[in-house]
Image (tube, rainbow, N blue to C red):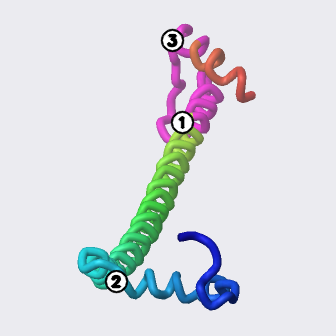
């Protein structure tokens, strides 16, 4: 028996009750569905708290790593500065030694004689710098 209802009017309950049917379906969840919804609602705050904690831990680790990189870079710069100062002192000493070859050194009072090989070596070494 399909067709019009027996009262002769068109069926308006379907057109008006479209929103109600969704609400009725929601209210007619099975026990399993209700339990699942309850578990989701109960666990959701814990998941949010865990996500916030993980994000805070990650940013903390990034800051620690950034500070360590800065510290290592500063130490490396200081070591390079010390090496540069040592190389500069070595070049100054070699330059002064090369100037004093064959001359009287006032503090010692006699001539400094270096082997010919040493003077050639210092000349080759100092040629790019002078």
**Label pair 2/3, CB-CB below 8 angstroms:** no
Q: Nearer the viewer, mark 2 or mark 1?
A: 2
Residue sitting at 59 percent across and 34 percent down? 91
- Marks 2 and 3, Cα distance to the nearest angstrom? 91 Å
Location of mark 2 (residue): 41
Check residue 112 for magenta coloring: yes
Q: Which residues are magenta?
A: 91-120
Residue at numbered disc 1: 90
* Label 2 with label 1: CB-CB less than 8 Å: no
Query: Residue 18 placed where, x, y %?
Result: 61, 83
Mark 2 vs mark 1, CA separation in Å: 74 Å
Q: Give the mark nearer the N terminus: 2 vs 1.
A: 2
The foreground one among 72 and 28 is 28
The number of discs equals 3
Let me know if residue 92 is in the magenta part: yes
Dot placed on the residue nearer the N-terminal end, 1 or 3: 1
42 w.r.t. 57: above or below: below
Which of the two marks, 1 or 3, is nearer to us in this view?
Answer: 1
Residue bearing mark 3: 115
Q: Nearer the viewer, residue 41 or 47?
A: 41
């Amino acid at each position: 028996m399909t067709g019009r209802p027996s009262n002769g009017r068109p069926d308006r309950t379907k057109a008006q009750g479209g929103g109600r049917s969704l609400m009725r379906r929601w209210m007619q969840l099975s026990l399993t569905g209700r339990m699942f919804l309850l578990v989701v609602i109960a666990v959701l705050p814990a998941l949010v708290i865990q996500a916030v904690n993980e994000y805070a831990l990650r940013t903390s680790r990034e800051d620690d790593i950034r500070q360590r990189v800065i510290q290592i870079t500063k130490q490396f710069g200081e070591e390079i500065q010390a090496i540069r100062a040592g190389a500069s002192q070595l070049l100054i000493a070699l330059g002064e030694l090369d100037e004093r070859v064959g001359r009287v050194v006032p503090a010692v009072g006699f001539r400094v004689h270096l082997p010919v090989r040493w003077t050639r070596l210092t000349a080759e070494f100092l040629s790019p710098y002078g």
